[in-house]
Image (tube, coloured by chain):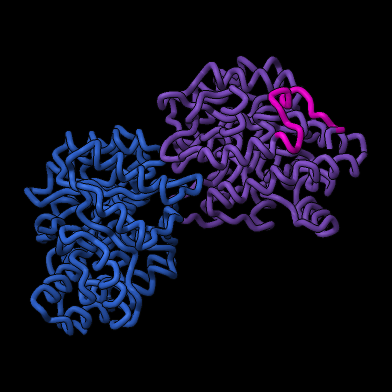
Chain colours: A blue, B purple
Amino acid sequence: MKTFTGLSAFPLTPLADDKVDESAFSGLVRRLSSAGVDSITALGSTGSYMYLDRAERARVAQLAVANAAGVPVVIGVGAMRTSHVVEHIDDAAAAGADGVLLAPVGYQRLGESEVLDLYRTATEHSSLPVIVYDNPGTTHFAFSNDLYARIASLPGIASIKIPGVPDHAGRAKKHVDAIRSILPEHVGIGVSGDAFGAAGLVAGCDAWYTAVGGTIPGPMLDITRAVQAGDHHEALEISRRLEPLWSLFTEFGGSLRISAAIAEHFGLAAPGCLPLPIHGLSSKQRQVLIGVLNEVGLDETAGQQFTRDNS
Amino acid sequence: MKTFTGLSAFPLTPLADDKVDESAFSGLVRRLSSAGVDSITALGSTGSYMYLDRAERARVAQLAVANAAGVPVVIGVGAMRTSHVVEHIDDAAAAGADGVLLAPVGYQRLGESEVLDLYRTATEHSSLPVIVYDNPGTTHFAFSNDLYARIASLPGIASIKIPGVPDHAGRAKKHVDAIRSILPEHVGIGVSGDAFGAAGLVAGCDAWYTAVGGTIPGPMLDITRAVQAGDHHEALEISRRLEPLWSLFTEFGGSLRISAAIAEHFGLAAPGCLPLPIHGLSSKQRQVLIGVLNEVGLDETAGQQFTRDNS
């Protein structure tokens, strides 16, 4: 049976004065739990895992589990060094996490056998389910389908988080089918890149790993539930209405800065919540973003529900 | 007056059982000092800085200074988070380092103003000279000449480590001249990418930041001294004789794996000295490498001198 299906939401790890803002983080996790997401993935790219030290990451894992109110929690454990990955897995397990998310982060370019060994070590070390995190935009490592297959055959691999699907619906389905055909039955496929969420689910992905849905889960849940109810048209229509938001992702340097600006705008995190050297959006970009949020009908209640008929 | 001119050699930080091999590291530093390099840069990319934690990096900085026998020591201080960079600078200063090397390491893609602010914070925090580390192959950040100029105008910037020069001698000189023309007088230019070392010095670079020269400084010193004596022909000729070695850099995945294999082959580090997940070279690759070392006349004495007339 596949685990981690449906909507997995990635909360920010907001900082205040260069320390984890535990209250803001706990609030984001509770907000996701109340909204009814299917799982919460803390310390993903949206959760700034690569910017935090071991103690901070262990504490965030504890807070995530403590505030998730029973919703399954996945913890990002990626690190440059294999022994550090193992430490993060131990900390996630000690916190009571339900799974871990592992990206092949590299400073030196990694080869396929090095990445395979990394996943082998992780799965041999722990019985926690491992989600393979394919995020070439940040790791600069490109998985081949063959490597997906070899990693997925390791016992303990639960899901593969793919970086998007082709734009065209037919090609998207073909892409997901091709990956599916080489994976064991129990290994799921999750789409990421929020602009591709609806298309990915419609194309047959089992999960959507959402970045901005870690701050505004409402519309991402509506899309996910529509697909699960078989209403592909409705799912794609909601995503289409969010197009002005998706288009800012490329323009403003990715989902992290956008998610942080939304959280700050809605008072869910203090201003300047990203780890330096990352700047938040400029004032001008924030104004554009707020205009877009108004245009698509997203306000601070978007944690709970999305006004479907606002367009 | 420019600092950090001539040959700066980058020693490995060998590991044994996932711990810093302090004895092997100290030996490499002493070897460089005896060979007469102009400075020693510990914790560069060759020194695996991004794979080590704060305590390990602080200890390596101390060992570098303790074993350098008065040769100036530069310490790599790059990290994902600005506050960690500042901590590493403090540790380098406490160890008695003469300068720091700072790359704009990113997980999220950084913008120019973010990188500028990183260098501003570093130079405002400490009076240690800062070497700007432009290494797009590992950081995936591309400096513009305009950004070089803005960073170099910060007080405390000593040198810019550029990632290579164009192949053609005329274009190489033009390239270096173009960078020189936008830098303050006191800021030097150092070439890296060992295959480009001789060409970079001949084109007017003030320094060569050498990776493999951290293990076999002999020929790199010969090249550097030849250029300093005005004998460009001799410098280029020595580099040409090393061509079989340079060609392995691309083929075998970069200078780190090559340097480690050479150190292991010469008994300067224990087998498996790189941090996992990085594998060393395969047995077959090692055999090819050893063949090349023999072909170009490099043996374990290459720390002290290079047999110039072996070809």
Q: In this view, does A83 lie above or below A216?
A: above
**Residue B244, position in %: x, y?**
72, 45
Q: How many marks?
A: 0
| Quadrant into which the N terminus of chain B falls | top right
Residue A148 in picture, x, y percent from top left: 32, 58
Toward the viewer: A160 or B77?
A160
Instruction: Name the residue rendered at 20%, 47% in the picture.
Output: A156
Give yes or no for residue B295 being in the magenta stretch.
yes
> Which quadrant of the structure image shows residue A16?
top left
User: In this picture, which residue range is highlighted in magenta?
Assistant: B294-309
Which residue is nearer to you in this view: A137 or B100?
A: A137
- The answer to whether A164 is drawn above or below residue B7 in the figure is below
Q: Is A290 left or right of B271, judged from the image as shown?
A: left
Query: Picture quarter containing residue A251?
Result: bottom left
Q: Residue drawn 35% across and 33% down?
A: A83
Locate residue A270 relative to residue A201 in the image: left or right: right
Q: Which residue is drawn at 10% across and 79% down?
A: A230
- When the figure is inspected, residue B133 is found, relative to residue A144, above or below; the finding is above
Residue B120 visible in rendering: no
Q: Residue B303: say if magenta.
A: yes
Question: Residue B218: x, y in percent?
Answer: 76, 29
Q: Where is residue A71 in the image (x, y as percent from the top left)?
A: 10, 52
In this rendering, the answer to whether A9 lies above or below A288 is above
The residue shown at (81%, 59%) is B171
Q: In which quarter of the image is the C terminus of chain B?
A: top right
Q: Nearer the viewer, residue B74 or A166?
A: A166
